[in-house]
Amino acid sequence: MIQAYKYSILYFLLFSLLLLLSSALLFDAKIGLSIESILHYYQGDAKHFVAAKSFGGILKIILPHIFAFGLFMMVILHFVVFTKYKQQLHYLTLASFTLALLELFSPFFIIQGFEFFAYIKLVSLFTLEILLLYILYLLQKSIYL
């Protein structure tokens, strides 16, 4: 692999790590990492004067995220094609896009009263972050063989 490509991919991986870290920190700061905090955030909490989220409000939040999630995962999964791990690509793609869809669309079910989707939201968030870290690890490992 040309050295310039290695550097550009390495920088992309570093920025991707910063993206994953900042997204986890923002989720914790804004919503919280417990089932109760997720339910309070989306369904509202009269005791703490938190209004319930509306369908339109959630839609405004997830619309740019749909594009960003898809683009980010398409780029990192595209890099996997050029590595020795390309035989895992089908599973990585299926898992990452499924987890992203669950993470993005679970709030719609939460506001409808399906509180179980708070668990889905939290588990899909953590699992997606771990899966993306694993993909970034595979890419980093393939650069420095």
Image: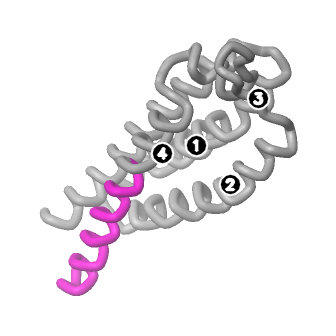
The alpha-carbon separation of the residues under discs 4 and 3 comes to 37 Å
First in sequence: mark 2 vs mark 4:
2
Q: Specify whether 63 is left or right of 35.
A: right
Q: CA distance from mark 2 to mark 4?
A: 18 Å
In the depicted structure, whether residue 77 falls above or below residue 108:
below
Q: CA distance from mark 1 to mark 3?
A: 35 Å
Secondary structure at numbered mark 2? helix
Asked if residue 23 lies in the magenta stretch, the reply is no
N-term-proximal mark, 4 vs 3: 3
Q: Which residue is mark 2?
A: 66
Q: Mark 2 and 4 residues: CB-CB less than 8 Å, in contact?
A: no
Residue 65 horizontal/vertical position (percent): 64, 54
Marks 1 and 2: in contact by CB < 8 Å? no
Q: Secondary structure at mark 1?
A: helix
Which segment is the magenta one? Answer: 1-20
9 within the magenta span: yes
Which residue is drawn at the image coordinates 47% and 24% (left, top)?
Answer: 33
Judged from the image, the secondary structure of the residue bearing numbered disc 3 is loop
Q: Outermost residue toward the left?
A: 145
Label 1 or label 3, whichever lies nearer to me, is 3
- Name the residue tied to disc 3: 51
Q: Mark 1 Cα within 10 Å, few/some/many (few <14, many 20+)?
A: few
Name the element at disc 4. helix
| Mark nearer the viewer, 2 or 4 | 2
At which x and y percent is residue 105? 73, 37
Mark 1 and mark 3 lie on one chain; the one further toward the N terminus is 3
Where 119 falls versus 128 (above or below)?
Answer: above
For residue 22, the mark is: none
Residue assigned mark 1: 94
Q: Residue at x 68, y 13 (%)?
A: 47
Mark 4 and mark 1 in contact (Cβ < 8 Å)?
Answer: yes
Q: CA distance from mark 1 to mark 4?
A: 6 Å
